[in-house]
Amino acid sequence: MSFGAGLRAVLASVGVLGLTLTAGTSPASAADGTPTAPTQLFNGNRHCSADVNRPTHLWARDGLVITGIPGTTGDSLVTARYQIWPVADPDQVTTVTRDRAGPRFEAPATVPAAALNDGQTYAWQAQTVAGDAASEWSAPCYVTIDNTRPANAPALSSPNYPPDGWNQGGQPVTFTLSANGDDDVTGFQFSWQQDFPVIGTSIGDYGIPQPVDPYSNPEYFKRADAPGGSATLSLIPPHGAGVMTLWVRSLDRAFNGSATTGYTFRVGSTAPTVTPAVPSPEFGRKTLFTLRPDAVLQSTSPVVGYSVRTSDHQGGTRTVDVTAAEDGTAQVELTLDGIHGEFIQVTSRSANGWVSDTASWNISYDTTPTVTSDVYPENGSGGGVGVPGTFTFAPKVEDVVSYTYSFDGGPEVVVAAGTDHTASVDWTPDTNGFHYLTVYATTGSGIQLAAYDYYFTVN
């Protein structure tokens, strides 16, 4: 949640909106308690720094939001008053207030951008006003305004995955990030996507910001070894093979981002092999598959497991994890019951975290029933109105126990299969012309197989 949206929502819920820019005391509700100095001080949604030598660096091109929780021993609404001044010129004081502030809630106010100079360090403090009484001022917080992003895009290189030609995969990619001569840079943000995650702050109870150091998230951020310095990354690519690009930008102390640098490289396939125990497994049968790792990948970092994804008879997928033996091979038994066919997709996982690209194996099945009729041949004409015809259903796969059929889109009817897994039904037309029959089989395990449409014409 952003500072503005989250905090506005909290404050609106207690009816304490209202901000004024003033040079003196703002009116407040009649007080029923003694005001105390505000606590929970934040600036730009980040923690207050009480050290003038280590100010918080903030972007403030749209103004600087400063906030604190005004203190009072009563329950009446109060005013939060803030003063800010350049450390180098304490006489240039700007005062902003938040009227009708609720006790226990953050009371933000915005210092206009026109009152702030880029590169200038400021001190600010907060005070609670209740009626004619005012608290002591809080200890000062210190901020440096930084509206200028790093001038140079970072330099980016990789010693083990050069950009020209195809690289053998298996090892994490080592990247060296450099500030590229910009001493303002303190770290880097990186992503396998060209769009970077937003650097934001959550808003907690009572509107209190909950700042988190971005560099605590190693998935996207890396601190430089010194201002204007460099950093090293060791990353597993997002997919096992193909053309990949890592995008990087430099960050300064205010988390302003530089222009972006992209590093593109190519990784050859490290996919495993998938081999069934028999060349053409039958539908519905359990089949043993052997999984073997890419040989070079196995020598780089041993394969410790596989992820196996298969289709199911309901049109979805299922995934199982299989542990590899010491030589990187594994076996998995799968029931092939996709009614139109089966696909198997397998990736290997190495000890160092590398995930290979996908190996695929597939087979097609025709699970529709065979339909025959002597009186009403398929795609032909015969019989006539009132002339009965027999339609015989026969399976193309094993374990069929029944058939479900309908004529001309009418109600479905179920007929049991005989010991030979076939069934016959009689039907008498009451109109001539075009007709059709739809039928599908069901197995003993409850799988509804693919439907078949049988077209014919009644004389």
Image: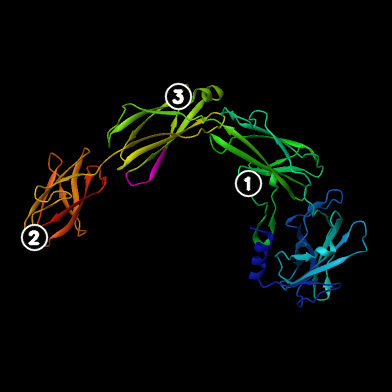
User: Are there few (<14), some (14-19), or many (20+) residues within 10 Å of tag 2?
Assistant: some
Of residue 155 and residue 325, the one placed in the foreground of this image is 155
Quickly name the residue at label 3: 325
Find the distance from the CA under tag 2 to the CA under tag 3.
68 Å
Provide residue 300's location: percent of width, then percent of height. Answer: 56, 24
351 on left or right of 214: left
- Which amino acid does the dot numbered 3 rest on? Ala
Magenta stretch holds residue 246:
no
- Point out the frontmost of discs 3 and 1: 1
Give the answer, above or below, for where 2 lies relative to 16: above
Provide residue 108's location: percent of width, then percent of height. Answer: 74, 65
Give the answer, above or below, for where 154 lies relative to 62: above
Of residue 179 and residue 16, the one placed in the foreground of this image is 179
Q: Quadrant of the C terminus?
A: bottom left
Magenta stretch holds residue 317:
yes
- Furthest toward the bottom, the residue is 30
- Point out the frontmost of discs 2 and 3: 2
How many marks on residues?
3
At a point 19% along the width and 55% down the height, the residue shown is 436
Find the distance from the CA under tag 2 to the CA under tag 1.
69 Å
Give the answer, above or below, for where 433 lies relative to 304: below
Q: Secondary structure at mark 3?
A: loop
For marks 3 and 1 on the same chain, the one whose residue lies earlier in the sequence: 1
Provide residue 322's location: percent of width, then percent of height. Answer: 43, 32
Quickly name the residue at label 1: 194
> Residue 9 lies in what quarter of the image?
bottom right
Give the residues drawn in magenta, as a range.
313-319
Quickly name the residue at label 2: 385
